[in-house]
Image (cartoon, rainbow, N blue to C red):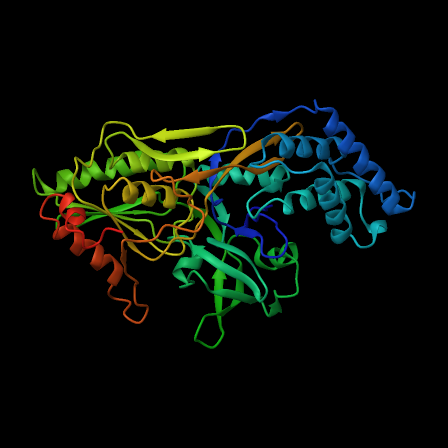
């Protein structure tokens, strides 16, 4: 899933691909070592070994210097059967693994045993959902670089599309954002080569490269002729929070939920309150537009900055359910809050927006969010690499699933033809300014409440 310049999560068809962007939600980066303890896992490894031998017609493959073997497949299989969000039949997993192996290598004579095993694991993971993926050693290492907020690439989150690749969200301050790429854009070519008929791995090979080098992507945008955009690859360092005062309203822009995002937010809240002066701060606008998410724990901390205790989000797995609650500190001191979202707001962003909306703490303004309502947990394999596996589903304090997206209380879209004015932000700022010093005015009026 990676090299030093583009981190990618490989899926088939319309599955999710993330190129130099954060994982939609690594709910718990709690890497664990998986022992092969279950008879079912050992049996699955034997089945894959037999399937591989049959596929080769009993002939040996090329010499192999890779690390993957049937034990690696057993670890992956065991984690899926034990921890995946819903039960999966053994036959379905084995069939998906065999299909993945054959689709990746139509000619088994060109593939080493390690390559066939990794293809089998990928095939099994592809059959689960858009967010469960196998990570080789390099990919697993890159995932943890992302979690800590520094990685290399183009700064764009994308998924596979029939025309090539679809942009979910560019990342603030990155080549993709500076070049003006937008959610919903389709990348049809890279350096003149069509992405439509290529696999995800082949597409990524065209996109990635050393920092400082340039790739030209062809962009198809609704209602416009296709156009070319040069993107120079660079090391991406995420600025967690950007903040400023707007007529004594605290504007807080959060780009990702990585390590210490909540701490950075609270520091900026203190700074802006001091800058406004005693009693002068009128409220908060929290901008989560095009924020693809990140760590669950950070979303809890961010939401908790505006809530005096109580439920933020709950998760439900096939084994148990869990509630996550805000602390009692409430550094916002009950001042009005408006959260900005758009179709690029996903995962942790949706947790924060849902908590603010369904706890009646403030308003959500903008466009319906992406709708990424599942929890991913990372599991490290013995010997390196691992899985990012969907283990639970998110639910807002109202009991509503995050899948399908968070609807705004007030629709507002930034008009691309008026670049000097951010219309959605102006709506949010006006709502805070007109709150009369109490967020309850926004809700008790009944004008905006859903």
In the image, residue 418 sits, relative to residue 210, either above or below, namely: below
Q: Along the line of sight, which residue is nearer the eye, 440 or 328? A: 440
Say whether residue 422 is visible.
no
**Residue 1's spot in the image, x, y percent?**
60, 45
Q: Which residue is drawn at 43% across and 63% down?
A: 181
Residue 326: horizontal and vertical position, in percent? 30, 30
The correct choice, above or below, for 446 with respect to 74 in the image is below
Residue at 59% in and 64% down: 162
Judging depth in this view, the residue of 71 and 434 nearest the camera is 434
Q: Is residue 219 left or right of residue 248?
A: right
Reply above or below: 230 against 116: below
Residue 92: name its quadrant: top right
Residue at image point 33% right, 49% down: 288
Locate residue 398: give its quadrant. Answer: top left
The residue under the point 87% across, 41% down is: 53
Describe residue 331's horizontal placement relative to residue 257 as left or right: left
Residue 424 position, x and y percent, is: 26, 59
Q: Is residue 271 visible?
A: yes
Please give left or right for residue 77 compared with residue 159 in the image: right
Residue ranking furthest to the bottom: 225
Count of marks placed on residues: 0
Seen in the picture, residue 36 relative to 364 is either above or below; the reply is above
- Spot occupied by residue 306 in the image (x, y as percentages of width and height): 24, 37
């Amino acid at each position: 899933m990676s090299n030093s310049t583009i981190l990618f999560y490989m899926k088939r068809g319309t599955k999710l691909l993330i190129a130099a962007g954060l994982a939609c939600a690594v709910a718990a980066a709690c890497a664990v070592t998986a022992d092969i303890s279950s008879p079912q896992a050992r049996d699955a490894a034997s089945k894959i070994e037999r399937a591989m031998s049959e596929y080769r017609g009993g002939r040996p493959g090329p010499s192999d210097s890779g690390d993957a073997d049937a034990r690696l497949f057993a670890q992956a299989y065991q984690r899926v059967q034990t921890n995946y969000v819903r039960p999966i039949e053994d036959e379905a997993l084995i069939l998906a693994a065999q299909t993945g192996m054959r689709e990746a290598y139509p000619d088994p004579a060109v593939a080493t045993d390690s390559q066939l095993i990794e293809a089998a694991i990928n095939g099994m993971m592809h059959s689960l959902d858009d967010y469960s993926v196998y990570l080789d050693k390099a990919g697993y290492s890159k995932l943890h670089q992302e979690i800590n907020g520094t990685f290399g690439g183009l700064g764009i989150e994308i998924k596979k599309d029939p025309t090539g690749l679809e942009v979910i969200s560019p990342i603030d301050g990155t080549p993709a954002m500076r070049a003006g790429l937008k959610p919903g854009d389709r990348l049809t070519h890279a350096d003149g080569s069509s992405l439509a008929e290529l696999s995800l791995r082949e597409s990524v090979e065209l996109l990635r490269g050393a920092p400082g080098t340039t790739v030209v992507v062809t962009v198809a945008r609704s209602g416009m002729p296709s156009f070319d955009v040069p993107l120079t690859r660079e090391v991406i360092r995420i600025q967690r929070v950007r903040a400023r005062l707007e007529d004594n309203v605290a504007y807080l822009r959060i780009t990702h939920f990585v390590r210490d995002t909540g701490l950075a937010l609270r520091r900026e809240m203190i700074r802006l309150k001091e800058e406004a002066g005693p009693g002068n701060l009128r409220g908060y606008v929290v901008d989560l537009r095009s924020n693809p998410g990140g760590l669950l724990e950070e979303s809890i901390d961010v939401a908790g900055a505006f809530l005096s205790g109580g439920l933020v989000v709950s998760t439900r797995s096939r084994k148990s359910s869990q509630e996550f609650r805000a602390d009692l500190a409430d550094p916002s001191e009950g001042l009005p809050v408006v959260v900005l979202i758009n179709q690029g707001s996903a995962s942790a962003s949706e947790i924060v927006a849902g908590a603010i909306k369904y706890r009646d703490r403030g308003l959500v303004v903008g466009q319906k969010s992406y709708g990424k309502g599942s929890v991913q947990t990372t599991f490290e394999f013995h010997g390196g690499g691992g899985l990012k596996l969907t283990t639970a589903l998110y639910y807002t304090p109202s009991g509503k699933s995050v899948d399908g997206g968070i609807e705004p209380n007030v629709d507002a879209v930034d008009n691309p033809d008026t670049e000097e004015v951010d219309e959605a932000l102006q709506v949010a700022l006006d709502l805070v300014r007109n709150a009369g010093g109490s967020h309850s005015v926004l809700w008790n009026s009944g004008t905006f409440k859903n």
